[in-house]
Amino acid sequence: MLTQHTSGSVRIRGTAESIPLRSDCVEAAMTILTLHHWSDWKRGLSEMHRISRGPTVVLTHDPIEYDFWLLDYFPILREMDRDMFPTVEEIAEECQSNGWDVKSIAVPVPHDCTDGFLGAYWQRPKPYFLANVRRSISTFNLLEEQLLKEALNQLRRDLESGTWEINHGHLRELTELDIGYRILKMTSGA
């Protein structure tokens, strides 16, 4: 969303679905984990492609390919993400129907990632207890307070009892994990 700040207020100048730039005016266009916030992701991709002389790049996560221990505590997150995120296959089909070539690249998440998206803390569960961490993850902001409290209490009990370590401690041996994050690079077809 493009914004213009004037005397303490914000006025929206454009959205992903209506970018107020001329065609072919930028070298490349990119979006990072935002498609699920757009009112029309197909239109947004079309707009990004329209303004770009070069590639259009999307970092997204595929709700079909994504799986890690947090979903054991918050299974509703999988359902929510499947409702909000288009799959990589759906994005690729849309791109191909517009005559664009699309390449999908897996983006394994490093064990020490601090970016703050949902899967960033796959190896270390304690950050999920921090309200400021959860606030930066859009699906957490949609959870009912009681469900959030119950799931966090179960996670806390499992950490204290050693159950989490028994079930997921093997993750500490990994330096990265593929949990469904993908870069999609779209270019005009030949």
Image (cartoon, rainbow, N blue to C red):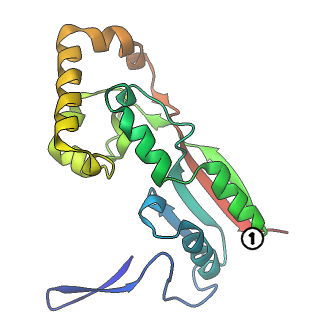
Q: Is residue 29 above or below residue 8?
A: above
What amino acid is at disc 1?
A: Asn
Q: How many marks?
A: 1
Can you tell which quarter of the image residue 68 is in? top left
Q: Residue at x 14, y 86 (%)?
A: 8
Q: Is residue 81 above or below residue 99?
A: above
| Quadrant of the snapshot with the N terminus | bottom left
| Residue neighbourhood size for the residue with mark 1, other residues' Cα within 10 Å, grouped as few (<14), some (14–19), many (≥20) | few
Circle 1 is placed at which residue position?
A: 98
Q: Residue at x 47, y 50 (%)?
A: 83
Q: Nearer the viewer, residue 122 or 161?
A: 161
Q: Is residue 138 left or right of residue 130?
A: right
Expressed as whole percent of the image width and height from the top left, the position of residue 94 reads 69, 63
Can you tell which quarter of the image residue 33 is in? bottom left
Q: Residue furthest right?
A: 190
Expressed as whole percent of the image width and height from the top left, the position of residue 152 reads 20, 29
Q: Is residue 130 left or right of residue 50?
A: left
Expressed as whole percent of the image width and height from the top left, the position of residue 186 reads 68, 63
| Quadrant of the snapshot with the C terminus | bottom right
Expressed as whole percent of the image width and height from the top left, the position of residue 70 reads 35, 29
Q: Nearer the viewer, residue 150 or 20?
A: 150
Q: Residue at x 18, y 22 (%)?
A: 156
Dot 1: element: loop
Q: Residue at x 32, y 53 (%)?
A: 138
Q: Nearer the viewer, residue 99 or 123?
A: 99
